[in-house]
Amino acid sequence: MSTKPEARPGKTRNTLQFVPELVYFEPDALHYPKGKRIHDWAVSLGLPIRITGSHNRITGLPGESELETYKIAKRTLVVGVRKTLKFDTSKPSAEYAIPIATGCMGHCHYCYLQTTLGAKPYIRIYVNTDDILEAARGYIAERAPEITRFEAACTSDPVGIEHISGSLKELIEFMGGQPLGRLRFVTKFHHVDSLLDAKHNGHTRFRFSVNADYVIRHFEPATSTFAERIEAAGKVARAGYPLGFVIAPIVWYDGWEDGYSDLLAKLGDAVPPEAANELTFELIQHRFTKTAKAVIQKRYPKTKLEMDEAKRKYKWGRWGQGKYVYPDEQAEALRQWITERIFAHFPKATIDYFT
Ligand code: SF4
């Protein structure tokens, strides 16, 4: 069983839940109930298991070329203890990033994890959820009486590994009991069933990453299809979760107007009426750094992702390296076109930001 990339995402297929090819445990992780549970699960499936002192010491992954090793690393699970309990900020979608996992088995060409995780693209699940929740409690108390929002998908796609970790459900129920705490995450996977009965108390915004068919088809291998995501969105809306869509990355390609019009029309048909009034949208145009471009071209040499610096505008970054975004005129055209279609189908929706 595995989440295999398919040639034609968007067509009917059944994206299976992720099962790693190799599982590492940091020894301390086995002292936690979650670590033990994941160990039992890996044993029951007969998965190869290794013990490692630290994820930094993982070397010698199989693979005959760098590319093959990269692909295997993306299907390798590391179960460990989260040591840093200082949360990063997560603007503009939330105040803090809450760390429950790192890495993803998806192969989205544009994914920023390509660069942020560098040579360690394996999937890490942290077993000390209680410590993480305690830290979150502290952050909420610091900002009281303001609401504090936590983003759980900054460094991974937590829905894609929820059947292994169960961490998202714990977070959702924790935030459900926090008058001043809110959770949000975004996913490209449709495996939401275990979350439908969580006591969320309306404190978790469940967002799905959606895009024009062209983008999903060319740049998002090893993720759930659009049809699967949208069906899952209906389920979570009916379970009473506040629902949102993140349209990212918005890509300028030949025919983008029709592509994004179709997308909004399909969302218009699929979103249950009970979710339409409080729907949120986040719009993020495609951007890349020089480092990302080099990594992407190495890992996905045939990618059709346009990354021509000459066609872009350079936007200085806060920490040194800047990004290439669309020139103002193109960015504005994308923003305006998509915004108009959003309000045509969802007059009461909120657009949180375009960036
Ligand atoms: Fe990255 Fe999300 Fe794609 Fe995973 S699903 S590779 S986190 S963009």
Image (cartoon, helix red, strand yellow):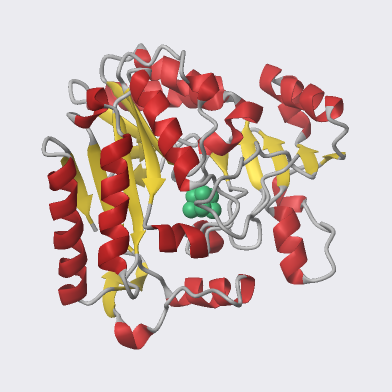
Could you tell me which residue is drawn at 52 percent across and 57 percent down? 220
Q: Would you say residue 20 is visible in this rendering?
A: yes
Q: Would you say residue 92 is visible in this rendering?
A: no
Q: Where is residue 143 shown, x and y percent of the image? A: 24, 27
In this picture, residue 208 sits left or right of residue 267: right
Report which quarter residue 167 is drawn in: top right
Q: Where is residue 339 shown, x and y percent of the image? A: 16, 53
Q: Is residue 216 above or below residue 302?
A: above
What is the quadrant of the C terminus in the image? bottom left
In this picture, residue 350 sits left or right of residue 124: left
Could you tell me which residue is drawn at 68 percent across and 35 percent down? 80
Q: Where is residue 8 shown, x and y percent of the image? A: 56, 58
Report which quarter residue 12 is drawn in: top right
Q: Is residue 245 above or below residue 136?
A: below
Could you tell me which residue is drawn at 59 percent across and 77 percent down? 302
In this picture, residue 112 sits left or right of residue 351: right
Task: Give 82 or 269, whichever is nearer the viewer.
Answer: 269
Task: Give 145 or 295, whichever is nearer the viewer.
Answer: 295
Mark count: 0
Q: Is residue 77 above or below residue 235?
A: below
In this picture, residue 10 sits left or right of residue 176: right
Q: Where is residue 43 shown, x and y percent of the image? A: 85, 27
Could you tell me which residue is drawn at 28 percent across and 72 percent down? 316
What is the quadrant of the N terminus in the image? top right
Task: Give 306 or 262, whichever is nearer the viewer.
Answer: 262
Q: Is residue 166 above or below residue 117?
A: above
Task: Give 54 or 78, whichever is nearer the viewer.
Answer: 78
